[in-house]
Image (cartoon, coloured by chain):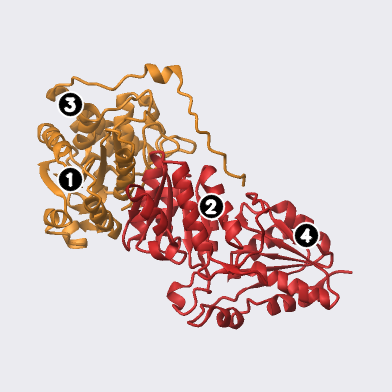
Amino acid sequence: MTEAVSLREAYGKTLVELGRENPDIVMLDADLCRSTMTQFFAGEFPERSFDCGIAEQNMIGIAAGLAAAGKIPFASTFAVFVPGRSYDQIRMSIAQPGLNVKLVTTHGGITVGEDGTSHQSVEDLVLITSFPGFTVIVPADAIETVQAVRAAAINCGPFYIRLPRPKLPLVYDRSYRFQLGKAVTLKQGGEATIIAIGVMVTAALEAAANLKRGGIDCRVLNMPTLKPIDKAAIIAATETGAIVTAEEHLEHGGLGSAVARVVARHHPVPIEFVAIKDTYAKSGKPGQLLERYGLTAKDIEQAVRTVLKKKGG
Amino acid sequence: MALPKRMNPSSVTSAAKHKAEVFSSSASLKEMEALARRIRRHIVTMIGKAGSGHPGGSLSAVEIVSTLYFRILKHKPQDPQWADRDRFILSKGHAAPLLYTVLAECGYFPVAELATLRQLDSRLQGHTDRNLTPGVEMSAGALGQGLSFAIGVALAGRLNAQSYHVYVLLGDGECNEGQVWEAAMAAAHFKVDNLTAIVDRNRLQLDGWCCEVMDSEPFAQKWRFFGWQVIEVNGHDFTQLGRAFSRARKIKGKPTVIIAHTTKGKGVSFMENNPDFHGKAPTAEEVEMALRELA
């Protein structure tokens, strides 16, 4: 396992680089600059930084106004507050007009850990993907984060990027080239396909390695762009005859739902969903929570075995 | 869904836009009063024809919005995206019929188009849509969002060293929304002085008198305590409004709010101070009666 690197820090540093390259990049935060790592940008570009205090709805509106006047605002807070606390503001001030606002949230999912339910965003992906026209990215490591943030900066339109609180092992090396809207095949395999996102990508690779030792050869896809989703990669995955999705989100409305829609329409094969099952999590260490709520490599392995039993002959 | 477009840094300005002129009007007070009556006739007629809409809060702000577009704003009806234009943001998006009428009267689109209000495929949606209607700055209708948006536009102007001024019209009922006060706090904190808010203080909201639904008094005091310069005027008096706008533009270091005291449904006797006409269209007979009063 490679060393763990902070995705938040990767974001914060990339934002500073973008700020140096483009004077139209501006930053907004809601009193979490030190946690989201927008503090680096605030330090170098105080005049382009707007800490809106603990007022997320207003932050969204200001970001929309800045974008309407030609700026490229990056607005950050915890994933539980954007989109959750500011849903209607995102809807009418950003999504409907299709304004060029970049929402980069941190502390996504349950790996926030000890802070508990109030700080664990398990619904942000279903909320944000519900908006027409939003591009939604969940990077798997720091290297992908840098490139996803850069992609958001140079492509016009509303973006949402969800980052976790903990450092994550690197999935990629420096040669990796993130492509917007494209899945990445991390491992070839013919018996089933594991499609994972964010924190779950490393677990998916571990599961696939374990399964291979047991004689089951799985394909592993990372699906960093949740919306618009890579339909071609999903349709191609149906050739393996069985799919398992893995995400740090409610089963309802996240990666699993998006994959199932494509599969059901184009080439139905059995799918199993590794996700949080219609519940809120509790305080605990990230690792304990992943185990308690069924989001480990073991859970993915179990899901593969289950889906293989349903696989047609 | 398609992937987003790569941004194109070079924007080509068409020759037509180069020729577009800054709007100017030398309308006298009498002519402005006649204009206000004409705007009111359009509002009543278009909402009557649409069969739904919000006449009360459109009629109350006629003098506010027409003063801005005819006497205060630097704008180019032939080039709605002119980068240096002053911005008017309608936060109380249900007054869309008023904004559409004033935009049409200025030449943003034909007056005849007002008859398409709320029809399928019309550019004139029930509430404003910035992607559809020339001159509309914000998609509004979900109350409470305009002041935040206006702060963003004003901050961008400041960062770009542009001299445009941003005006945003709120309803007094709209000020029930918590986001308005988040924004009020932020505008003062960021010292946004290229921003003027106007509150259409007609004292009525859908469910009745504001003071009975959700009392916001002392209203002016609240804005002062949030760090704003407050100017109170009769919102139907062109002279008072013009003076207030000029004064607001000179105040530096803090935002200004003009609390414009108005009458909901102004100009149509049976709509005045009548909450029934907050969000109800007049019948054909009522349109006739209203047009007689506004002749």
On the same chain, marks 3 and 2? The answer is no
On the image, the x and y values in percent for residue B58 come to 26, 41
Label 3 or label 2, whichever lies nearer to me, is 2
Up the image or down, A67 lies above or below B208; here it is: above
Q: Secondary structure at mark 3?
A: helix
Q: CA distance from mark 2 to mark 1?
A: 35 Å
3 or 1: tag closer to the N-terminus: 3
Residue under pointer 1: B253
The foreground one among A180 and A170 is: A170
Q: Residue A270 is drawn in which quadrant? A: bottom right
User: Label 3 amino acid?
Assistant: Met
Which chain is indicated by disc 2? A
Q: Nearer the viewer, residue A9 or B45?
A: A9
For label 2, the residue is A149
**Residue flagged by tag 2: what amino acid is it?**
Val
Picture disc at residue A237: 4
- In this view, the residue farthest toward the right is A313
In the image, taking residue B175 as reference, residue A46 lies left or right, namely right
How many C-alpha atoms fall within 10 Å of the one at disc 1: few (<14), some, or many (≥20)? some
Residue lying at 76% horizontally and 55% vertically, measured from the top left: A235
Amino acid type indicated by mark 1: Gly
Element type at mark 4: helix
Q: Which residue is mark 3?
A: B32
